Image: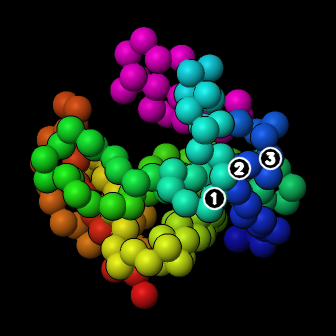
Amino acid sequence: TERMDVVVEPLSAHPDLIATVAAWHFSEWGHTDPGGTAAAWAEGLARQAAARQPPGTLVAHADGEPAGVVCLVPHDMPDYPPAAGLTPWIKGLYIVPGVRRRGLGGLLVRRCEEWAASLGHAELYLYTEAGSAAHGLYRDLSWRDSHAGRYEALSITTTKAALR
């Protein structure tokens, strides 16, 4: 694979990209938010664009172009009892299709792991649809499955990483 020049920064350093990132997220997961809009998702992202503490958002540029995003949030699945009390969570990892399978997702996950560890957390959590490509990515990054169940009509797997 050809080498990409990658820079990862807080989304707050690129406020002009908030609508773009919201559109990425909305196209991928908007179906889970009946009545939601890309504009409403952009408002939510604008509130968590910094990367000092969760919720926060990191954006990756590959060769100068916006290429991916990931969020670190205090909680995900708030109404799901097996997830109660677990914090923090990775949410919204999205890589632009043209640069997928080139290590960018893994890089963003590792940056989130470092960020959570720097805030004193010993573990980091996320959930994926069971058997999905995303689930495989996290398994390849040494995340461990911790729970399988159903959430929002999906078969999901909750996964965690032990942080150094």
Q: CA distance from mark 2 to mark 3?
A: 5 Å
Whether residue 160 appears in this view of the structure is yes
Q: Earlier in the sequence, mark 3 or mark 1?
A: 3
Q: Is residue 30 magenta?
A: yes
Relative to 79, 11 lies left or right: right
**Residue 89 % position (x, y):** 39, 57
Rendered image: mark on residue 127: none
Amino acid type, residue under disc 2 in the picture: Leu
**Mark 3 crowdedness (10 Å alpha carbons): few <14, some 14-19, many ≥20:** some
The structure residue drawn at horizontal position 44% and vertical position 57%, both measured from the top left corner, is 90
Which residue is under mark 2? 11
Quadrant where the C terminus sits is bottom left
- For the record, the magenta segment spans 19-37
Q: Are marks 2 and 3 in contact (CB under 8 Å)?
A: yes
**Residue 149 % position (x, y):** 12, 48
Relative to 22, 13 lies left or right: right
Which residue is under mark 1? 51
Seen from the viewer's position, the closer of residues 47 and 35 is 47
Q: Is residue 29 above or below residue 55?
A: above
The structure residue drawn at horizontal position 19% and vertical position 52%, both measured from the top left corner, is 84
Rendered image: mark on residue 14: 3
Q: Earlier in the sequence, mark 2 or mark 1?
A: 2
Amino acid type, residue under disc 1 in the picture: Ala
**Residue 103 % position (x, y):** 60, 68
Amino acid type, residue under disc 3 in the picture: His
Seen from the viewer's position, the closer of residues 139 and 82 is 82
Q: Are marks 3 and 1 in contact (CB under 8 Å)?
A: no
Q: Are marks 2 and 1 in contact (CB under 8 Å)?
A: yes
